[in-house]
Image (tube, grey):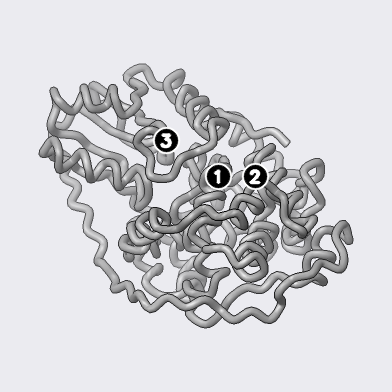
Amino acid sequence: MQFVTSRLEALTKLNKFIESDISNYNSKRNFDFGVTDRNNVSCLSPYITHRLISEYETAKLVLKKYPFQKVDKFIQEIFWRVYWKGWLELRPKVWSDFIEDIKTIEENEKYLQAVNGKTEIECFNDWVNELKNFNYLHNHTRMLFASIWIFTLGLPWQKGAEFFMKHLFDGDAASNTLSWRWVAGIQTKGKNYLAKSWNISKFTNNKYKNIKLNESALPLTDKREYKLKPLSFNYENNSNENLLAFENELNLENQKLKKYKNIYLVLLGNDIRKLKLDHKVIDYKSKIINDQKMRFDQIQLLDEVKLQLILEKARSFDVIHPCIGENYSYLNSVRKKYNLNLNFVLREEDKFSWQFSNKGYFNFKYNIPNILSKFKIN
């Protein structure tokens, strides 16, 4: 299994999936047939995470060929990512609390056994090694993995979410953090996801059998409540000649780039990150960013050191909103330090869609046709 690093290659992968494999998605998407057989899923998540291709153009290309009813499960899965982003934008303290929680959790012997694939659970150990070797796990397997981590191994969900972010090519602050909370039973309070031996056996095509798991664990509890914080993006189309973007917002095609004298693409290194990334993940992000540089003349690639040199000279920037997570937190810290004037560029599709993230996914799913219609995607 190999992931590409350019927008053109990502679009080629998307079109191949649409032409050849999407017809099997509804019925086979939950099966994990192993790293050599992924035709039942799209494996597009690394490109969508970095927005080499966006959720919206993905949906548009799919619906150009198929009616919604034929591909509804795939469209819904794509929009889960949009929903999670919106949900976290409306409750940003969930992310900051998660980061603070990690600082206080000890990496004990049980944790070390888990992250090194040395537990007594064969499937879990195999998935640890697969994650480290390929920087990807099947989506259903991620749920099973998280459930075993939390309820059978008794490890903190926060450290599991951190482990995923370290190794996944498609690690996304919203989707990853909130999915782990959901499995734990604190995202939808009182409703956890329990991995069961029969479930693992069925959806791995009987590769694993008779797995000893805690199949009756109660949901975790978290007394913290998170109030909605209204979205506010005051973007004014002024005379800025500088544009900032981070590696998780690389789809620059539909931005008005001609007016910018300088476009700075930023990739934070591990020295500055709250969540340290595996070197292969950093390398992957670097390759993706380099593809952008080849396509746009005015782009400069920056790490945090080079960025700070720029910030000492310039004070006003347009910024493609990087969403709540590592990049946004860093941006806020330098914003205060250098007294920056930042105008956030938010995609109209996100701005419209995120308003439906104020409740559970059912409410959001109900409004997917409205989103599709609004932007002429259907």
* Amino acid type of the residue that numbered disc 2 sits on in the rendered structure: Tyr
Q: Is residue 133 above or below residue 120?
A: above
Mark sitting earlier along the chain (3/1): 1
SS class, disc 1: loop
Q: Which residue is mark 2?
A: 136
Q: Which residue is mark 1?
A: 170
* Amino acid type of the residue that numbered disc 1 sits on in the rendered structure: Asp
43 relative position to 272: left or right: right
Q: Which residue is mark 3?
A: 247
User: Camera-side residue: 251 or 3?
Assistant: 3
Mark sitting earlier along the chain (3/2): 2
Query: What quarter of the picture does the N terminus occupy?
Result: top right
Q: Nearer the viewer, mark 3 or mark 2?
A: 2
Q: Residue at x 37, y 71 (%)?
A: 358
Q: Is residue 214 visible?
A: yes
User: Camera-side residue: 178 or 234?
Assistant: 178
Q: Is residue 302 above or below residue 174?
A: above
Residue 76 in the image: state x and y as whole percent: 58, 63
Q: Residue at x 13, y 39 (%)?
A: 341
Mark 2 vs mark 1, CA separation in Å:
7 Å
SS class, disc 2: loop
Q: Residue at x 69, y 33 (%)?
A: 2
SS class, disc 3: loop
Residue 151 in the image: state x and y as whole percent: 63, 70
